[in-house]
Amino acid sequence: MLTHLDEQNRPKMVDVSSKNDTNREATASGIITMSAKALDMVLNNKNKKGPVLQTAVISAILGAKQTSTLIPMCHPLMLTSINCDIDELKDGFKLIVTAKLKGQTGVEMEALTGVSIGLLTIYDMVKAVDKSMVIKDIKLLKKSGGKSGKYELKL
């Protein structure tokens, strides 16, 4: 039986009220590639729209916090921590988002949404210089907590 459908085949949000609170953490990442000109502009803070990487981090945090308003079956969560790291690549950036909470349901979607929104923000801020940017490889790297325990992506 699918967990997001009731007995009459109607959509529902899963009832997690009987689950115990556990410490939960999830880390996701994604990549945006761009032209050398766009990369140089971002790295040297020469973007007309402002500081791209700092804005992307703020957007990733906001995206993680807003997951339940964007993804219909996600529970609103009281996140206790959201951390964002950006690694410079030869042709772009890798954004890594870790979300944490103590609660009854996981934070994988929050980490993944944070990555997606952060990368989309970079695209939006740089598109005037490079419309050929590519957002790719958005994935869950690891999670812990809850009934299913630990997961780590095998690369």
Image (cartoon, rainbow, N blue to C red):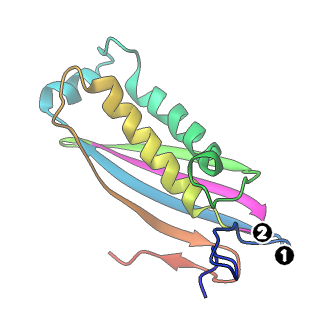
Instruction: Name the residue: 20% across, 26% down.
Output: 38
Could you classify mark 1 by the number of other residues whose Cα lies within 10 Å: few (under 14), some (14-19), or many (20 or more)? Answer: few
**Displayed quadrant of residue 40:** top left
Q: Position of residue 99 (x, y in %)?
A: 61, 54
Label pair 1/2, CB-CB below 8 angstroms:
yes
Disc on res. 148? none
Depicted 59 relative to depicted 29: above or below: above
Name the residue carrying label 2: 104
Name the residue carrying label 1: 20
Q: Which residues are magenta?
A: 93-105
Which amino acid, mark 1? Asn
For this view, does 20 lie left or right of residue 140? right
122 in magenta: no
Instruction: Name the residue: 68% across, 68% down.
Output: 12
| Image quarter (top left, top right, bottom left or bottom right) of the N terminus | bottom right
Residue 43 seen by the camera: no
Q: Position of residue 31 (x, y in %)?
A: 31, 49
Which amino acid, mark 2? Gln
Main SS class of the magenta portion in the image:
strand
Q: Decide which of 68, 90 is in the foreground and name it.
A: 68
* SS class, disc 2: loop
Mark nearer the N terminus (1 vs 2): 1
Distance from Cα at disc 1 to Cα at disc 2: 6 Å
